[in-house]
Image (cartoon, grey):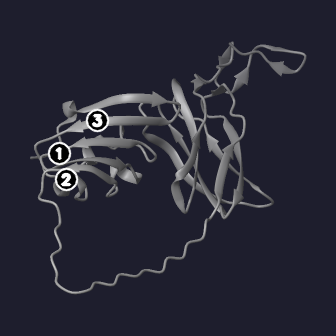
Amino acid sequence: MPYIASNLIPLVAADSFTLWLYRTTDTRATVLSAGYFAAARTRLLAGHMVVLEAADATALLPVRTNAEVGNGLVVDASSSPLRLTGAGAMRLGADLAAAAVARCVSLGPVPSGVNEGETFTVRATASGATNLVRFSVLNASGAVVLGPSTAAVTSGSASATFEAPVPGNGYRVKVEDAADALVAQTSPSFVVLAAFALLVESGFGLLMAEAGTRLVM
């Protein structure tokens, strides 16, 4: 059975994070297949989590880019448990080695409003193993309308310049580690205002000015 949009329900939303519930008669393996949530790419964003109630399991799945989900953690399953039966002695051993890699990005101040067609620059600081970041501009639905623009981290910071999109509100700037999309931050919303027009214009001639400055409306 394909993805059913009405079965995807938000449980908790805070800043750029959302915890979703998805109920389906499909198996967990079907839900994990590539492109299953493709139709929900504007709702399921990288960093979100999905509580899955599938036909054969209940699981907690991380959302990656393009609405793809990871294997996550199975908290309950309807299949028979694994059983090992043997005679004699069993010896199990394992050597594990791990190293923590710190990554952090922090978005700088974003203007609360810009005019259509104007350019504006956004900046972010980065630390740890982060050496490349991606900047994007999202609309009110969470879809990318500008970017992503990749920038190198120099002396702990990076920046990108965008031209303001069409007028509207609810736009946000997002920055993420180019190597790990879960290391990300989204700005508060800002508005794009319609471009100013000359108060009086005729062809290419300016008819009204004050102190050498064009009057606008």
Tell me the kind of residue under disc 1.
Ala
Tell me the kind of residue under disc 2.
Arg
Query: Image point 38% across, 50% down: which residue?
Result: 62
Q: Which residue is mark 3?
A: 21
Q: Kindly give the residue lying farthest to the bottom in the view shown.
A: 88
Residue 127 in picture, x, y percent from top left: 72, 57
Circle 2 Cα neighbour tier, 10 Å, few/some/many (<14 / 14–19 / ≥20):
many
* Mark 1 / mark 3, whichever is N-terminal: 3
The foreground one among 77 and 167 is 77
Query: Image point 68% across, 18% down: which residue?
Result: 198
* Above or below 98: residue 175: above
The foreground one among 113 and 9 is 9
Q: Secondary structure at mark 3?
A: strand
Cα distance in 3D space between marks 2 and 3: 14 Å
Q: Which residue is mark 1?
A: 54
Q: Which residue is mark 2?
A: 28
Query: Image point 62% across, 24% down: which residue?
Result: 195
